[in-house]
Amino acid sequence: MCGIIAYIGEGNAVPVLIKGLKKLEYRGYDSAGICVVENKRLITVKRKGRIEHLEKHPGLKNINSSLGISHTRWATHGEPSEINAHPHLDCKGEIAIVHNGIIENHNSLKKLLEKEGHKIVSDTDSEVIAHLIEKFYSSSLENAVAEALKLIEGAYGLAVIQKDENKIVAARKGSPLILGIGKNEMLVASDIPAVLQYTRKVIYLNDNEIAVLTNNSYSVMKINGEKANKKIHKIKWSIEETEKKGFRHFMLKEIFEQPDSVKNLLRGRMKNNKIKLTLDMDVKKIKRIIITACGTSWHSALIGKHIIEDLTRIPVYVDYASELRYRNPVIKKGDVLIVISQSGETADTLAALKEIKSKKCKCIGIVNVVGSTIAREVDSGIYLHAGPEMGVASTKAFSSQVLALLLFALWIRQEKGYKIDDDLVRELKKIPEKINIIVKKSDRLRELAEKFKNSTNFLYLGRGINFPVALEGALKLKEISYIHAEGYPAAEMKHGPIALIDRNMPVVFLATKNNLSDKILSNMQEVKARKGRIIAVANEKNKEIEKLADYIIIVPETLNILSPILNIIPLQLLAYHIADLKGLNVDKPRNLAKSVTVE
Ligand code: M6R
């Protein structure tokens, strides 16, 4: 959940590290720090709070160093503070480390090290790593790191420097780490945007690999000492794609990008009513599909269940990855697992994937970040090609995930010999333009947000395929505006939650046309009768809806199976504007990080 960037080269390390940290801030932002080597001395500067705060630190002025490591933190062990911020140093102040992950046996390692005379000053789990490396250090940093890692249990992305050695040693187990291969400069980072300004050539480290980088060389070995042969990947994203392009926030930019991101998903995959996917499986053998994910990706999985069951009649089971991984699930012949993850690095999702894979189940990934750990672990998959998603609140990844699941279902139909419905294909092609119509209503949604920004609770209600949209709308609101919100199947209200309704309760209804429209109207009646304030997402202002709803957001009509992709857009915008009007940090909400690489 933290961000690491390290640099060695001919340039000045400090500005490279600061810029890189800013690109990684989405991974955590409660404290940050830098350590560089200058004249065979380690200089360490740390600060509580954001990177801008660190950048202004007088200790960083006039440093001339071409080797350094840095870190932006999302606290897991020990409160956000200067002392707990990384880099952490050994007792002599000669070795410095930055770490992302959790060292599970840090308590026992701490006891062992303290017995040997090491002084551990922070409350973090990470600091023991610096002391362990010190314990094993004689003349080679990589050997000392390798020895230290043998004692460590848990997850790590790690970068290490030593005052006399002109190199960076990096290691990975369970937490993402890439090497950026430049011209007379090398970088180590938790994610690609941090290195893009310097190089497009990257190497993905695998678990249990250790890399050694100098100005103009790199080598990678396995923890057991064997050489690892690594492929260099060329990154195609542009730097602009990772920037805000004039929008106030990444989240708003990413909401507005959805007409293009869904087009990118469809590109080359749908031609003349034929679906082209390269998935490694025999569809005739599929008896059951299990989908696992976390957060927003789990919501798209719930929609995927509706879509896949409807179009293929194959039963689908959806499970939170954090639950599935520990349940010893029953996996049978004919089962297929789909894992959904924007980042491809979510720890619980990855662990669930590994658990199911170990039971010899075929695994498919629906992932956005190319080359991410989940993308590399699955047997085959569908990349979203949505471009980098930087806002902590997931938006464009959601619409693309739903569309990817639809393509998957259509592909199964096709492989089973069924023709793909012309109406569906026609409507699919219109989706980008229909999203465009909705994002243009952003100002209208801001006016609505103004009316509701001081509410302390919200309910989101939907039915059928739009129930997960209600869940996702509520998640968007709570994570960025800190307003309590719940998503519910509309018909469940009378089994309890209706007791919450009074004139202060805004209730967002997903009331677009489908076979349950009349039922939704009855559910709206129930809320209206108790004086709830209704916001309806609907296809038209017909008399019945006008009678019941206080506010109506019109979205273009589409097929029910495609409606979640359109219906979520106004809910994303409503959440965005409420949070922005409340003056909150939309892209970096409190207590959250973009990529949850810890359990
Ligand atoms: O990268 P992933 O899709 O695996 O992430 C899963 C969740 O952590 C993520 O969707 C989270 O819920 C977002 N903050 C929601 O906006």
Image (tube, rainbow, N blue to C red):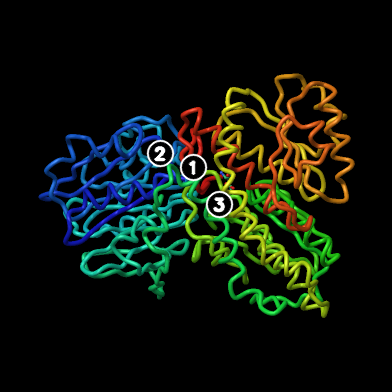
The residue sitting at 67% across, 31% down in the picture is 485
Which residue was labeled with disc 1? 593
Rendered position, 346 above or below 248: below
Horizontal and vertical percent position of residue 177: 41, 58
Which residue was labeled with disc 2? 29
- Separation (CA) of disc 1 from disc 2: 8 Å
Report helix, strand or loop for mark 1. loop
Quadrant housing residue 330? bottom right
Horizontal and vertical percent position of residue 23: 37, 50
Question: Considering depth in this image, is 564 or 440 the residue closer to the camera?
Answer: 440
Residue 204 is left or right of residue 67, and the answer is right
State whether residue 351 appears in this view: no
Horizontal and vertical percent position of residue 409: 75, 67
Question: Considering depth in this image, is 560 or 98 the residue closer to the camera?
Answer: 560
Of the image marks 2 and 3, the number of the one nearer the N terminus = 2
State whether residue 234 appears in this view: yes
Rendered position, 309 above or below 362: above
- Separation (CA) of disc 2 from disc 3: 18 Å
Residue type indicated by callout 3: Thr
- Separation (CA) of disc 3 from disc 1: 11 Å
Q: Residues within 10 Å of mark 3 (few under 14, many from 20)?
A: many
Q: Residues within 10 Å of mark 2 (few under 14, many from 20)?
A: many
Of the image marks 3 and 1, the number of the one nearer the N terminus = 3
Asked if the beta carbon under badge 3 is closer than 8 A to the nearest atom of ligand 1, the reply is: yes
Residue type indicated by callout 2: Tyr
Nearer the viewer's eye, disc 2 or disc 3? 2
Residue 346's disc is 3
Residue contact at pointers 1 and 2, CB within 8 angstroms? yes
Horizontal and vertical percent position of residue 514: 84, 51
Quadrant housing residue 374? bottom right
